[in-house]
Each structure stands twice: as C-alpha cells, then as structure tokens.
Image (tube, helix red, strand yellow):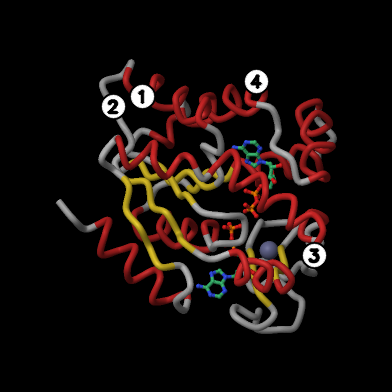
Amino acid sequence: MKIVMLGAPGAGKGTQAIKIADKYDIPHISTGDIFRANIKGGTELGQKAKSYIDKGELVPDEVTIGMLLDRIAQDDCKNGYVLDGFPRTIPQAESLTEALKSQGDRIDFALNIDVPDEAIIKRMSGRRACPKCGATYHIVYAAPKTENICDKCGTELIIRSDDKPETVKDRLNVYHQQTEPLIAYYKAAGVLREVDGTQELPKVFEDVVAILSEN
Ligand code: ADP
Ligand code: ADP
Ligand code: ZN
C-alpha cells in the first residue's frame, strides 16, 4: 500500500503516519526527518536544506525530489510506504506520479488531514520532538509519560527551531500557496480521502484505518 499524507504543518501527519506504518508494517518516510538527520550529521544535503527550513520555506525541488526517489527505490519500500511531508509542490507530485507510472504503479491513497489554521497554531506551540528518534509529543494533547523525556528512547525533548510562532505563520502561508493545490491534484487522480484532523488523536486514526480498509 502506497500512501501520501497531505495537510498543513502541524495537522498531525507525522503522528498518524507513524501509527499507519506500525499497523501495516510499511516504512514511514518523512522528508522533514531526513533533512533534520542530515543537518545533525553535518552533510552537504543538510547544509543546503538548513537555511530554507529555518526560514520556513521549502527546500528546492531539485534537492528534494532526487532524495525522495532514491529513498523509495530501496528494498524496504517494495510492499509500500507512507510518505509524510512529500509531495509538497505540484512538480514533486508529478515526479512521484511519473516514477511510479514507469513501473506500472501508483499511489493508492492521499489522506488529507484537515485542520484549520487557528488550531494549527495551538498545536505547534505545544509540540515537542525527540532529537534522537524523531518521536513527536504535545504538552497537552500527547504528553510523554515523564515530563520532557521521550517515552521511546529516554532522550530529553526539544522545541523544533522552526516551530516558533513567527516561522509557523510563514510555513502556513507556504502551505496554502504551494502545497494545498495537491488536494485538487490527488482528487483528480481519484485517490483523495478527507480526514477530520480536529478530532482527538485515536478517533483520527480510527477514521484513517476505515479509509485504508476500503476495497
Ligand atoms: P511539518 O511536519 O511540521 O509539516 P516537516 O518536518 O514535514 O514539518 O518539514 C520541516 C521543513 O522541512 C519544512 O518546513 C521544509 O522547509 C522542509 N521540507 C520537508 N519536506 C519537504 C518537501 N517535500 N519539499 C520541500 N521542503 C520540505
Ligand atoms: P505534522 O507532521 O502534520 O506537522 P504532527 O504529527 O507533528 O504534525 O502533530 C503536530 C502536533 O500536534 C504534535 O505536538 C502532536 O502531538 C499534536 N497532535 C497530532 N494530532 C493531534 C490531534 N488529533 N489532536 C491534538 N493534537 C494532535
Ligand atoms: Zn526518542
């Protein structure tokens, strides 16, 4: 099963994608996580990506598309994957469609996690991330068992530098301009499914599973 997660920054794409990956035993591929790992590792790719991410802008398609296509060509992607944070532009979506088409394949579901901007701002201000394993928490809605410590690996949680309110506003603008058109793109492809992302986390996942169980 090949799944694309759509939705604004902070809509809950990552939270749901991790649960989908777990349930269906497919890799969770987050372009944001790949960029952050490269920034941390001081790679050339990380250096290229950092200035864009810090400003809340998108990393250019020339960098991002090749990186993602390489990733999904790996062996663990044979039975599918859940893409979180890719595609974010029409050219990215077109490249993905073409790459799959050349193998007689396509995306099965594009799940749009719909959350209005006001709720996004609230979610982002409470988001905490594990710098080691990538797990995401929320101080109110998804608190770790021990305050500020990752449940999975025991590392101290951080506030992502691009989750500052000023940067979140820029990221929302970028979302509306460059990423929201993907909803129409996947609707035209017949694979778009809408999910009400304002519900509590387990209910959102229930709705997601109901959609993925369709035939
Ligand atoms: P969020 O989960 O809050 O939407 P991500 O972790 O997906 O954030 O992305 C963080 C940042 O990484 C983005 O603001 C952007 O700068 C960059 N990025 C991630 N994925 C892409 C992509 N597909 N194209 C361009 N830039 C990307
Ligand atoms: P995205 O990957 O779309 O940027 P995340 O999955 O990181 O979004 O979620 C953003 C923040 O909102 C996190 O702090 C997460 O714990 C929290 N969150 C996710 N889903 C929900 C939900 N349904 N209700 C309340 N908070 C949520
Ligand atoms: Zn962790």
Mark number for residue 105?
A: 2
Judged left or right of residue 62, residue 13 is left
Circle 3 packing at 10 Å, graded few (<14), some (14-19), many (20+), is some
Judged left or right of residue 114, residue 131 is right
Residues at marks 1 and 3 touching, judged by CB atoms closer than 8 Å: no
Circle 1 packing at 10 Å, graded few (<14), some (14-19), many (20+), is some
**In this view of the protein, which residue sits in the foreground, 101 or 170?**
170
What's the CA distance linking mark 2 and mark 3? 38 Å
Callout 1 secondary element: helix
Task: Tell me the residue that label 1 is attached to.
Answer: 100
Residues at marks 1 and 2 touching, judged by CB atoms closer than 8 Å: yes
Of the residues under marks 4 and 2, which one precedes in the sequence? Answer: 4
Callout 3 secondary element: loop
**In this view of the protein, which residue sits in the foreground, 167 or 49?**
167
- Percent coordinates x, y for residue 177 in the rendering: 60, 41
Task: Tell me the residue that label 3 is attached to.
Answer: 159
Which amino acid, mark 4?
A: Glu
Identified at 32% across, 47% down, the residue is 192
Task: Tell me the residue that label 4 is attached to.
Answer: 62
Of the residues under marks 4 and 3, which one precedes in the sequence? Answer: 4
Residues at marks 4 and 3 touching, judged by CB atoms closer than 8 Å: no
Judged left or right of residue 194, residue 150 is right
**In this view of the protein, which residue sits in the foreground, 120 or 30?**
120
- Percent coordinates x, y for residue 72 in the rendering: 47, 31
Of the residues under marks 1 and 3, which one precedes in the sequence? Answer: 1
What's the CA distance linking mark 4 and mark 2? 23 Å
Identified at 54% across, 24% down, the residue is 70
Callout 2 secondary element: loop
Identified at 31% across, 19% down, the residue is 103
Identified at 63% across, 25% down, the residue is 61
Residues at marks 4 and 2 touching, judged by CB atoms closer than 8 Å: no
Of the residues under marks 1 and 2, which one precedes in the sequence? Answer: 1
